[in-house]
Image (tube, rainbow, N blue to C red):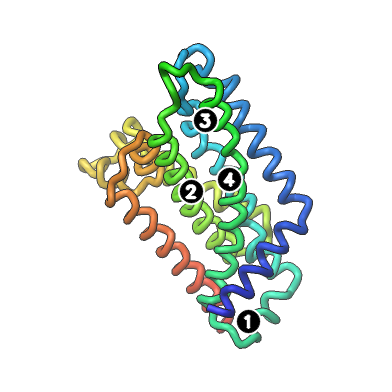
C-alpha cells in the first residue's frame, strides 16, 4: 500500500503541476454548463432537473477522459522513464494501480467542481417543484463509475504505445464502440439474437439505469468488473513489455 500511495502522490502531483490539467478542467466545466443551459431543454422544461447535464456526460467523457489517460504510460515510454520506474522495488500491479488512482483523483476533482451546477438549480428552483437530490446523487455515482471505466480503458490503451495521440485515439475508439452497442437500435443489428447480451457489455446502458435513479447491484458489479478487467490487461501489458 505504501508504494501505491507514493506512486499516487507522484501522479496526482504531476497532474496538478501541469497546465494542461487546468485546461482540461476549464473545458469540462464550460462544456458541461453549456450542454445544460443552451443545448438541452432546461429552460423550456419548467422543472428543476439536471437531465440535460448528465445525458451528455458519456459524450464529454468519451473525449476528455482518454485525454487524461493517454499520458499515463505513453509519456513514460517516450521519455524513457518507464524502464527506470520498473527497476524500482515496486510490483507491476502497484505501479498500475497507483497511476490509475492518480488519474482517477483528477476525474473526481473534475466532477466535484460541477457541484455548483445542482446547487444553482436547487437555489433558484420553485419551492413547489424543488430539485430532487436522490436522482442527482445517483447520476453523480453513475458518472463516476462510467468515467472510471473509460479511464481504465484509456490507461490500458496508453500502455500499448509510446505515442500519446495513438493512445488517445485507441482509448476513444474502444470506449465509443462499447458505448455505441448500448443503444437499442445498434443492439438490434447484432445477428443471432445476441443484441441484448452485447448491449449488456456497454457502460452506457448501465449508466442510463443509474442516472435515472435506479440503483441496481448488477450495474455496480458490471462497472467494478470492467475496471478490474482493463486494469488486469494493463498489468499484463506492462509485464509483457518488461520481459520482452
Residue at numbered disc 3: 53
Q: Is 135 rendered above or below residue 230?
A: above
Residue at numbered disc 1: 86
In three-dimensional space, the C-alpha distance between marks 1 and 2, rounded to whole angstroms, equals 30 Å
Give the mark, 3 or 1, whose residue is nearer the N terminus: 3
On the question of residue 199 being in view, the answer is yes
The image quadrant that residue 199 belongs to is: top left
In three-dimensional space, the C-alpha distance between marks 2 and 3, rounded to whole angstroms, equals 14 Å
Residue at numbered disc 2: 144
In three-dimensional space, the C-alpha distance between marks 2 and 4, rounded to whole angstroms, equals 10 Å
Give neighbour class at mark 3: few <14, some 14-19, many 20+ (Cα, 10 Å): many
Give the mark, 4 or 1, whose residue is nearer the N terminus: 1
Give the mark, 3 or 4, whose residue is nearer the N terminus: 3
Residue at numbered disc 4: 112
Q: Residue at x 53, y 55 (%)?
A: 151
In three-dimensional space, the C-alpha distance between marks 4 and 1, rounded to whole angstroms, equals 33 Å
Q: Position of residue 73 (x, y in %)?
A: 63, 66
* Residue contact between numbered discs 2 and 3, judged by CB atoms under 8 Å: no
Amino acid at each position: 500500500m505504501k508504494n501505491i500511495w507514493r506512486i499516487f502522490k507522484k501522479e496526482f502531483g504531476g497532474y496538478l503541476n501541469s497546465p494542461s490539467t487546468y485546461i482540461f478542467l476549464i473545458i469540462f466545466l464550460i462544456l458541461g454548463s453549456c450542454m445544460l443551459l443552451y443545448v438541452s431543454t432546461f429552460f423550456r422544461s419548467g422543472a428543476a432537473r439536471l437531465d440535460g447535464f448528465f445525458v451528455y456526460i458519456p459524450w464529454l467523457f468519451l473525449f476528455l477522459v482518454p485525454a487524461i489517460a493517454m499520458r499515463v504510460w505513453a509519456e513514460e515510454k517516450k521519455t524513457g522513464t518507464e524502464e527506470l520506474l520498473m527497476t524500482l522495488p515496486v510490483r507491476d500491479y502497484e505501479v498500475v494501480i497507483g497511476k490509475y488512482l492518480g488519474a482517477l483523483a483528477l476525474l473526481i476533482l473534475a466532477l466535484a467542481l460541477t457541484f455548483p451546477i445542482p446547487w444553482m438549480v436547487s437555489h433558484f428552483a420553485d419551492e413547489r417543484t424543488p430539485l430532487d437530490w436522490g436522482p442527482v446523487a445517483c447520476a453523480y455515482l453513475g458518472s463516476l463509475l462510467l468515467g472510471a471505466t473509460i479511464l481504465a480503458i484509456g490507461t490500458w490503451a496508453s500502455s500499448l504505445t509510446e505515442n500519446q495521440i495513438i493512445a488517445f485515439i485507441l482509448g476513444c475508439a474502444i470506449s465509443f464502440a462499447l458505448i455505441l452497442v448500448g443503444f437499442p437500435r445498434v443492439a438490434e443489428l447484432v445477428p443471432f439474437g445476441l443484441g441484448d447480451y452485447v448491449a449488456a457489455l456497454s457502460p452506457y446502458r448501465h449508466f442510463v439505469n443509474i442516472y435515472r435513479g435506479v440503483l441496481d447491484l448488477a450495474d455496480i458489479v458490471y462497472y467494478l468488473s470492467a475496471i478490474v478487467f482493463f486494469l488486469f490487461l494493463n498489468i499484463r501489458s506492462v509485464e509483457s513489455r518488461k520481459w520482452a
